[in-house]
Each structure stands twice: as structure tokens, then as C-alpha cells.
Amino acid sequence: MTLILGCIPALIDNFFAFSRITSMSHRTVFFISDGTGITAETFGNAILAQFEMKTRHVRLPFVDSADKAHQAVRQINHTAEVENIKPIVFTTLVNMEVLEVIREGCKGMLLDMFGTFVHPLEEELGIKSHHRVGRFSDASKSKEYHDRIEAINFSLAHDDGQSNRDLESAEVILVGVSRSGKTPTSLYLAMQHGMKAANYPLIPEDFDRKQLPPALVPYRKKIFGLSILPERLSEIRSERRPNSKYASLENCRQEVADAESMMRRSGIRWLSTTSKSIEEIATTILQEIKPDRLIY
């Protein structure tokens, strides 16, 4: 881990030095992979976020042959000629023959992320990597992949309180007022980490009873609450149902206050989603819930 973290500053320094070559703030960025390109784009975007610049993204997935690599090179070089500036090229290519075509012919700034991290790790660990193409290769044989699909199906079936069946299988149950971020967070946890996440809306009937929905009471330890500022909630709801009581600021204030009071009385952990991304919300939940296992 120390070795990997040590490589990151150098990668960012090289990128920053290159960005000073020109005063132009607009760049085309290519993400090339012999798989889906998700890893290249995710990692590349994390680095690009450190710089104030506008970018045009081009993802080139499934570049798994020399012929496709030559096609990618032609596209990159054409962009360089038209825009009169080097494109930035992030790659996660594991096929060395394909990578060599890109290295030799590409007129962009090439950032080989696997080369930066995998080769030093091979030397440190004294073993060769699998050089496996793609995060989801051999999906039919992967228990982790099937667990992820099962988690997604579970989260969809238990979205917005659709079903109370099999809640004992849930690893987390999200509660909160309507439009506080429960559904996207549940699906993110399922898709990214293979967690079976259910979500349940808190509604006026629950507030009148001043109790959690009866179906959730046996699973109190699995419950995590999401809240949101009433002003932001009103904005979100107004996009769906403008000029309605549902979206009115007064109603949003009352629902949020009632929901937070209920969560405090019930001893439920909760957070405000107002200014947080789905990734930040999910990470906080994982830190609090501490599930026995996670898929990455």
C-alpha cells in the first residue's frame, strides 16, 4: 500500500508539469482499456479533478487487439492535429502488444496506470500479476459477481418499502423522508460493494404514531437514517410535483423535523445528505455499519 501511495504524487506532479506547457484550459482526454474502461475513467477523473480545466472525455473500451490499438492511435492523433494540442491519454491496458502500439504511435500524453502500479507491485511482492483483462472478466465463474447481481436484485425488490419479505437478509435498511437519497444510495451500495440494502420511506402515518414502521422494528440495529435540509428537499420535490403540498417548504420542514425526532428517539444513526455525494453517503454508512464482508 505504501508503494502504491508513493507513486501517486509523482503521477500528479508529472501531470501538473505537463499542464503548464500551455495556457489552454480545454483538453480532450482519452480513456483506453481492453475492458470496459471504467477503471481508467474513474482513476483518471480522480486525478483530473485536481486541476481547474475543461475536458472533453472520450472512452475507448475493448481495445484488445493491435488493430483496434491502431484505430485508437489514429483517433488520438487526429484529435491532436485538429486541436493543435496533445490529448491526455489514460490507459489500463494489460496486453503489452496492444500497449506498445499506443506507446509508439500515440501523439498524446500517455499515462499508463497499470504500468505505474502493477509492475512495481510485481517487483515488491515477487510474483507476477494475472494480467487479467477487465474487472468483470470470467463473470460467469465469479461468486463475487453473482453476489453483486443478487444484491442489486434485492435492493430493487426492497426499494421504497415495496416489500417486507426477507428483511432479515438485508445488511442495511435506509430510512428517511421521500427524496432524501435512499434509492440511489441503496443501489450504489449494491452495485459497488455487493451489499443487500433495503430502503423504507418515513411517511406522515409513521410520524402520527411517533414510531418506526412496524415491519422495521425487529431490525433496528440494521437501520441507518438519511435526512436533508428542508430547503433542499423542497427544491428536489418541486422538480417532480411543483406547487404541491408535498413540495411546499412548510411541509418539508415538518416532515424533516418529525423524521429526525423519530430517529433520535429510536437511537438510529443518521446523517444529512444535503451537501454530500452518493459516494460520501455510502462511505459513511459503511464506516458505521461495518459489514462482515464487502465486494470491490
Image (cartoon, grey):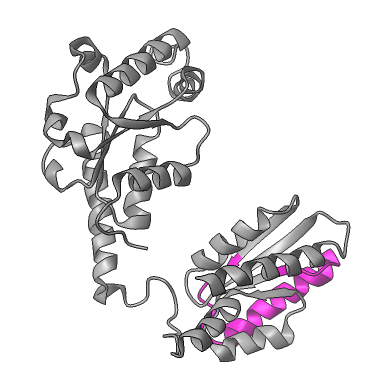
> Residue 117: horizontal and vertical position, in percent?
56, 77
Instruction: Name the residue rendered at 81%, 54% in the picture.
Output: 25
Instruction: Name the residue rendered at 37%, 47% in the picture.
Output: 287
Q: How many marks?
A: 0
Residue 126 on the magenta segment: no
Name which quarter of the figure residue 288 lies in. Answer: top left
* Region in magenta: 59-88
> Residue 214: horizontal and vertical position, in percent?
12, 25
Residue 77 on the magenta segment: yes
Q: Is residue 265 above or below residue 9?
A: above
Q: Is residue 114 above or below residue 217?
A: below
Residue 31 visible? The answer is no
Location of the C terminus by quadrant is: bottom left
Residue placed most toward the observer, 148 or 120: 120
> Residue 86: horizontal and vertical position, in percent?
80, 70
Instruction: Name the residue rendered at 30%, 22% in the picture.
Output: 264
> Residue 15: horizontal and vertical position, in percent?
74, 66
User: In terms of secondary structure, what is the magenta stretch mainly?
Assistant: helix
